[in-house]
């Protein structure tokens, strides 16, 4: 399968703990996006990477959130000191930079539950 | 970011065509119209996109009004597997644009056997 993969698929943690999610985009896709989706809502944009550079961050991305994409390949999203409000599905997507409107390919998501 | 308006839900019978409307009265000249859908417990999936002309692909057709203030996603023969939330999204072109997608609530499509 050459699609976008995310790990883990599910994560249950206690409030105050740190969690890290991984996203492996489609090979050679230089654009990578993180979104967050809460129950009954559409996905919300969190951050965008072009290769290894993080070029945009949403105001939704508090200081407790950090994302990296070393060497422009896989990406990680870390949440420090998790809160119950962080419970959501975290989605990763990638696209090839043909034009900015290139279709995005989404992974299956990581569902985070903060107890 | 330009906004879109979609009905919250629609129903269709299996094997019948489905027309999903989207209003985007504040669309700008460089906004592309994208449609994604999200099946239960899955990430969103690209369906189709266009700028001015109608578009067809193996999944669906996109009909864009002449003034571009509305569009319609057409599923020619709905199947049970088409039951999903359908999102209509505007995204600007341009090398300086990130291509991020701004999702609304979408339309939940139910397909009845």
Image: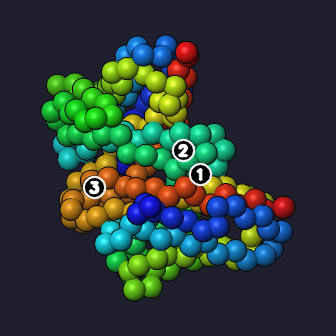
Q: What secondary structure is marked by label 1?
A: strand
Q: Is residue A42 left or right of residue B18?
A: right
| Residue at left offset 49%, top offset 75% | A75
Task: Please state the horizontal and vertical placement of residue A84, each as a whole percent of the image.
Answer: 78, 60
Q: Chain of mark 3?
A: A
Above or below for B79 versus A33: above
Task: Please state the horizontal and vertical placement of residue A90, each as a whole percent of the image.
Answer: 59, 60
Q: Which mark is residue A37?
A: 1
Ranked by sequence position, the earlier of labels 3 and 1 is 1
Q: Which residue is mark 3?
A: A102
Q: Which residue is mark 2?
A: A42
Give residue A22's quadrant in the image: bottom right
Q: What secondary structure is marked by label 3?
A: loop
State if disc 3 and disc 2 touch (CB < 8 Å): no
Q: Residues within 10 Å of mark 2 (few under 14, many from 20)?
A: many
Is any atom of residue A40 visible in this view? yes
Q: Is residue A31 left or right of residue A87?
A: left
Asked if both marks, 2 and 1, belong to the same chain, the answer given is yes
Asked if both marks, 2 and 3, belong to the same chain, the answer given is yes
Q: Chain of mark 2?
A: A
| Residue at left offset 25%, top offset 45% | B31
State if disc 1 and disc 2 touch (CB < 8 Å): yes
| Residue at left offset 73%, top offset 77% | A18
Give residue A86's quadrant in the image: bottom right
Ranked by sequence position, the earlier of labels 2 and 1 is 1
Q: What secondary structure is marked by label 2?
A: loop
Task: Please state the horizontal and vertical placement of residue B63, each as a whole percent of the image.
Answer: 24, 26
Q: Chain of mark 1?
A: A
Asked if both marks, 3 and 1, belong to the same chain, the answer given is yes
Q: Is residue B89 left or right of residue B104?
A: left
Instruction: State the residue lying farthest toward the bottom.
Output: A71
């Amino acid at each position: 399968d050459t699609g976008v993969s995310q790990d883990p698929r599910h994560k249950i943690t206690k409030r105050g703990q740190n969690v890290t999610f991984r996203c492996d985009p489609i090979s050679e896709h230089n654009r990578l996006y993180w979104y967050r989706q809460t129950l009954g809502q559409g996905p919300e944009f969190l951050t965008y990477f072009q290769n290894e550079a993080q070029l945009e961050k949403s105001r939704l991305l508090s200081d407790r959130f950090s994302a990296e994409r070393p060497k422009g390949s896989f990406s990680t999203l870390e949440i420090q000191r998790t809160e119950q409000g962080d419970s959501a599905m975290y989605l990763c997507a990638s696209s090839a930079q043909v034009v900015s409107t290139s279709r995005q390919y989404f992974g299956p998501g990581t569902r985070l539950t903060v107890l | 970011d330009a906004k879109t308006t979609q009905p919250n839900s629609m129903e269709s019978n299996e094997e019948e065509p489905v027309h999903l409307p989207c209003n985007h009265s504040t669309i700008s000249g460089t906004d592309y119209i994208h449609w994604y859908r999200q099946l239960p417990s899955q990430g969103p999936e690209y369906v189709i996109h266009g700028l001015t002309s109608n578009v067809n692909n193996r999944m669906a057709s996109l009909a864009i009004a002449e003034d571009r203030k509305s569009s319609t996603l057409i599923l020619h023969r709905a199947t049970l597997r088409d039951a999903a939330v359908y999102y209509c999204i505007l995204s600007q072109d341009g090398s300086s644009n990130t291509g991020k997608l701004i999702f609304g609530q979408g339309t939940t499509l139910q397909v009845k056997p």
